[in-house]
Amino acid sequence: MFIESRLTQNGLRQCLRVAGGGALGFVISQLMGWNYGVFFTVFPMFLLGMVPILNGHIIRQFLANVSLNVLEVSLVVGLLKHMPVVMTLVVLAMFLFRFNLMAKGPLFLFGANGVLTLSILLHFASYPSVDLSDLLACNLVASGLAVFIAMLMHTLFPDVEPRKPPPGATKLASQIRHETLIGALTATLSFVVFQVFDLQGSLSAQMATILVLFALGYSGAKVSAAKRAVGTLLGCNLALLMQLLLYTQSHHFLLVMLLYWLGLMLFAREHIIEGAGSGIGFGGLTALGILFGQSLGPQQDLIYSALYRFSSMSVALTLTLLVMACLHFLLNRWEPTRLTT
């Protein structure tokens, strides 16, 4: 068991890239005083943690998705904000397009990043108090910065040996339809619920409902949700411990930075060892990223934010799994969307 839990040389380098990238994004956003710090903390983690390599194909997918997201959100919110039913149908169509790309495989990163970013942008952009131009500008800057940080981290901590490409998988057309529909319908329903109940401050809960959909199915989502709940709980508890250690010294940025980097290293190591997309390690990473990127400030209480974030995320994940279970049952009753054993 001890041998199996050790990091390989490539795994150690990726661990350093994820922790270093997430920490650098946090430092830059804090020093520059930019809004929506969560973009600057989570985007580098996503780009460095979800894929272990970086090449032109991956960068093009990431940047193309950003450009498309900005255009879509500008048009949808600007033209359809006063027509919620039509807006919801358009959002469903956008999610169907991206989950279809994810189910097919080659453009998984484009679809996954699009689903996550689009859900966050649409949620915040629909509130009248939010400056849409500032929101989209921060998203563009954070995405470009994430690519720069990823390139820097791969330069500083390159792999020591070539990585083997992931094994290809052949899917039936019915399975692709099943995964596309269950993902798009659940993501759209999540968007509607967060709009109707005015849950503007529940970003972690919304991200949790989206990240579990990356498993592309109910069976995988059950495992992913359990791991994400554990990861978020550990991330929130670690944030609370950091707050207690800092106590009245939270204004010392170097101390905050050191503890934050150590926390990212801990969860990055777990993420690499798991070898899973959104498991315990990535759940802890994003929990820390959201708490420090959005809730760390002189007028904000990190303890309250951590407790609220975990409780809201637990409720959101439970409801998401119930919805997916119902959709899974219904889709399996129709031949064109039935999963074969």
Image (cartoon, helix red, strand yellow):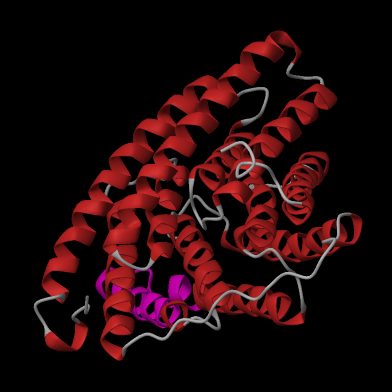
Tell whether 104 sits left or right of 50: left
Q: Quadrant of the C terminus?
A: bottom left
x and y percentages locating residue 125 in the rendered image: 49, 60
Q: What residue is rendered at 76% in x and 48% in y? A: 12
Quarter-wise, where is residue 10 in the image? Answer: bottom right
Q: Point out the stretch of residues depicted in magenta.
A: 75-100
In this orientation, does residue 296 appear?
Answer: yes
Q: Does 113 lie within the magenta span? A: no
Q: Position of residue 96 (x, y in %)?
A: 36, 79
Q: Write down the quadrant of residue 201 in the picture.
A: top left
Q: Which residue is drawn at the image coordinates 73% and 18% (left, top)?
A: 250
| Front one among 294 and 242 | 242
Please name the predominant secondary structure of the magenta segment in the image: helix
Residues 327 and 161: in front is: 161
* Residue at 58% from the left image edge and 79% from the top image edge: 68
Name the foreground residue: 315 vs 198: 315
Q: Quadrant of the N terminus?
A: top right
In magenta stretch: residue 90 = yes
Residue at far top of view: 248
Observer-nearest of 40 and 9: 9
Please tell me whether residue 65 is drawn above or below residue 128 in the rendered image. below
Look at the picture and state if 127 lies above or below 315: below
Query: Looking at the picture, how far across and down is residue 277, in whole percent?
Result: 52, 58
Measuring from the top left, give residue 280's x and y in whole percent: 49, 42
Relative to 313, say whether 240 is above or below: above
Which residue is situated farthest in the left direction here? 333
